[in-house]
Image (spheres, rainbow, N blue to C red):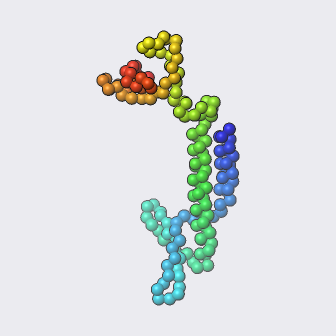
Amino acid sequence: MLIEKLQKRREALLKRLAQVGPFVEGSIVRLPHPSCDHVAYRLTFKARGQTKTVYIPVDLVEEVEQWHRNYKRLKKLTRQITKTSLGILHRYVPERRGARSRSKARERTWRANWPGRSATSSRTLIVGWTSCRSTGTRTCSTTPAATWCGPVC
């Protein structure tokens, strides 16, 4: 259910992405000349790890500023689409398992011959990995029997 909402949101964001228009990456720098009232504009950007600068003609300044605003919109939309796609990935398996939460997914019902219990009794335990203090082997640690050294799971 939540995945469907996220997919619809992503589709809407992708439609907005298609409407961005021309864009340019970099920073627009305004350089006033101290001796006169003339102002020069430059576009500064990175290319192959080096900073490059391009002169912007005065009659194109407004248009290049719009391209720069479009680039900022593009970056924002890209981050939102990525976040939404990651949300779909994180929720895919839990929803397919019947909407169990992640913490519930780690719980397992074990039927084991614990001291004082019969082989048919069941216990719900939280499963995790730990190293045995005495042997150094990787073992399955469970709560409440966290110090139990059993076979490697």
The quadrant the C terminus occupies is top left
Q: Residue at the far left: name it.
A: 134
Q: Residue at the location (40% across, 19% down)?
A: 151
Residue 33: percent from left, percent from top: 48, 84
The quadrant the N terminus occupies is top right
Q: How many marks?
A: 0
Q: Residue at the location (51% across, 73% down)?
A: 29
Instruction: Judge from the rendering whether residue 53 lies leftward or rightward of residue 137; answer left or right.
Output: right
Q: Residue at the location (48% across, 71% down)?
A: 53
Residue 126: percent from left, percent from top: 48, 27
Residue 24: percent from left, percent from top: 57, 65
Instruction: Judge from the rendering whether residue 44 lies leftward or rightward of residue 58; answer left or right.
Output: left
**Image quadrant of residue 87?**
top right
Q: Residue at the far front: name it.
A: 116
User: Do we see residue 140 in this rendering?
Assistant: no
Asked if 84 appears above or below 34 in the picture, the reply is above
Residue 84: percent from left, percent from top: 61, 47
| 119 and 80: which is toward the camera | 119
Instruction: Judge from the rendering whether residue 85 lies leftward or rightward of residue 45; answer left or right.
Output: right
Asked if 26 appears above or below 86 in the picture, the reply is below
Q: Residue at the location (57% across, 58% down)?
A: 75
| 145 and 141: which is toward the camera | 145
User: Do we see residue 143 in this rendering?
Assistant: yes
| 152 and 75: which is toward the camera | 152
